[in-house]
Amino acid sequence: MFPSYSSRGFIGLTIALLLLNAVFFYLVTDLNNLTVEMGEEGLLENLQLIYLGLAALAFLIGGLRSEGPARMFAIGMCLLMLIFFFRELEVEPTGPVSGYIKSHAFRWHEAILVIGFAAVYIFLHSAYVRPVLQFVFSRKAWPFYMAAALILFGEVFEKMDSFAYHEFFEEALESLSYFMLLCLGIRSIVAAPAQKQSVKAA
């Protein structure tokens, strides 16, 4: 009913790409100038926005190509990626649009839109809620928990002010988490045809 997010081949490729990302982050970061490197205009911050934007798009496409509970889950992940995207987005309030994005009103409007959309979607497809929750709390969803763990580890490093490179590890772990979510979004697209066939067969 759900795409396989934990197949051996996919996980192996994802881990290899995560390691390549980690090495890339280390090579391109000037560890002696972290104040600038870890700023909002730094490479890692911009990569996080790219990863999150692409992940949102990937889960949206994967959801539209899927059927049943798998579609609900993918659309939900798309919304979550958009929330993370706007959380990471830092813009100077130099005009009406950027000023609105930085305002508390935007956060309230964002919350209202997300909650409203989710409520309507769940109401129209209430039969999918239980299968989605069963998947979320199953072992098959462990790659998503791994992505969440990377963010949590990043938060731990954020609090470690006494550690000289805490900012680098915080941003690197967050970037790796978002990259993994992008990989999972792509997986939802690639596995959608097989998932749709399994729904029809059932």
Image (cartoon, grey):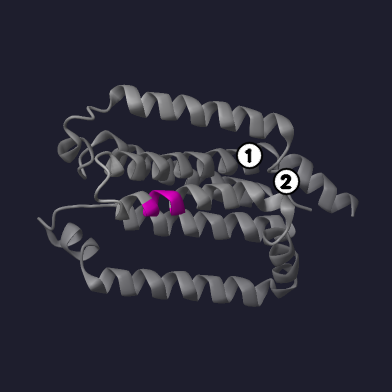
Q: Name the residue at the top extreme.
A: 27
Q: Residues within 10 Å of mark 1 (few under 14, many from 20)?
A: some
Residue matched to label 1? 187
User: Is 155 contained in the magenta span?
Assistant: yes
Say whether residue 21 is left or right of residue 118: left
Label 1's element? helix
Q: Residues within 10 Å of mark 2 (few under 14, many from 20)?
A: many
What amino acid type is highlighted by mark number 2? Answer: Pro
Which mark, residue 195?
A: none
Specify start and end residues of the magenta stretch as a single range.
Answer: 152-156
Residue 151 horizontal/vertical position (percent): 44, 51
Q: Looking at the magenta stretch, what is its main secondary structure?
A: helix
Residue at the (84%, 48%) spot, across then down: 198
Residue at the (39%, 72%) spot, across then down: 111
Work out whether mark 1 precedes mark 2 in sequence or the reverse, and give the earlier one.
2
Which mark, residue 3?
A: 2
Is 58 drawn above or below residue 86 in the view shown?
above
Residue at the (21%, 45%) spot, across then down: 40
Residue 6 horizontal/vertical position (percent): 70, 41
Is 69 drawn above or below residue 115 in the view shown?
above
Residue at the (70%, 63%) spot, across then down: 132
Question: What is the total number of numbered labels drawn onto the structure image?
Answer: 2
State how far apart marks 1 and 2 are (Cα). Answer: 8 Å
Q: Name the residue at the left extreme.
A: 94
What amino acid type is highlighted by mark number 1? Answer: Arg
Residue 156 horizontal/vertical position (percent): 38, 53
Label 2's element? loop
- Between residue 102 and residue 68, name the one nearer to us: 102
Pointers 1 and 2 in contact (C-beta within 8 Å) = yes
Residue 123 horizontal/vertical position (percent): 64, 77
